[in-house]
Image: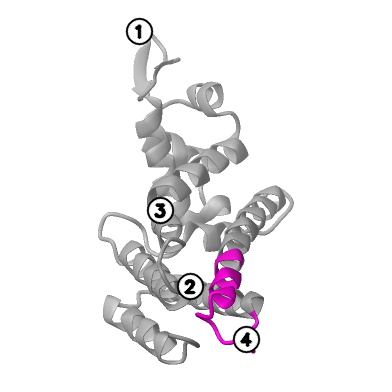
Amino acid sequence: MEMVIPAQTRGRPREFCVDTALAAALGVFWSKGYEGSSMSDLTAAMRITKPSLYAAFGNKEELFRKALDLYEAEKLAYMRDALRQPTARAVAEHIMRGAIDAQTSSRDPKGCLGVIGASACGAEAESIKTEVIKRRASSSAALLDRFRQAQRDGDLPGHIEPAALAQFLFTILQGMAVQAGAGASREDLEGVLKTSLMIWPGR
């Protein structure tokens, strides 16, 4: 349910939609990264004043965390769907295809917000980098559990190390995100997907 909060402005107060403002902030962070997004950039995109931003979202760091929540809920739903696929190979393919769809969308910036956040540096961004790494670890753990189950089911060969396989997939995904951010085409990324599936162990 959308929540409307009065924005503190000069003269007559106006109202703004928190969900709409947060989506706008996500777009800024996704395009410019955490450190590259100034408060002026954020307030301009969100169409609110700094006092209104602080009142509704807290500081810049807290706003980024909320934007990351939105990103995971809306843009990474394919990750959750992938874990329900019947084989490890199908899991990997579903994740890579979902990533390609997201990274080549004409509606959203290119690349991955998690990669952008994890590459932040400096004292101000250290907690952001830690948060992104923690969330990535949670996703990695879920994928590792799925690959271990696949091995117990006989879907993956016994000599395959599930942890290394999960890391391999995430390395491919991060590389695809960097390439997408640098302008790689959908055809380029699908070539990576096809090659990855050719060397994927098991069925």
Residue 24 located left or right of residue 66: left
* Amino acid bearing label 3: Ala
Would you name the residue on which mark 2 appears?
Answer: 173
Disc 4 and disc 1: Cα gap in Å? 69 Å
* Amino acid bearing label 4: Gly
Disc 1 and disc 2: Cα gap in Å? 48 Å
The quadrant in which the N terminus is found is top left
Would you name the residue on which mark 1 appears?
Answer: 12
Which residues lie in the magenta part? Answer: 145-161
Q: Counting residues from the N terminus, which is met first, the one under dot 1 or under dot 2?
A: 1
Q: Counting residues from the N terminus, which is met first, the one under dot 4 or under dot 1?
A: 1
Residue in the image at 43% along x and 76% along y? 179
Which tag is nearer the camera, tag 3 or tag 1?
3
As drawn, the label of residue 77 is 3
Does dot 4 land on a helix, a strand or a loop?
loop
Q: Counting residues from the N terminus, which is met first, the one under dot 3 or under dot 1?
A: 1
Residue 133 located left or right of residue 194: right
Q: Counting residues from the N terminus, which is met first, the one under dot 3 or under dot 4?
A: 3
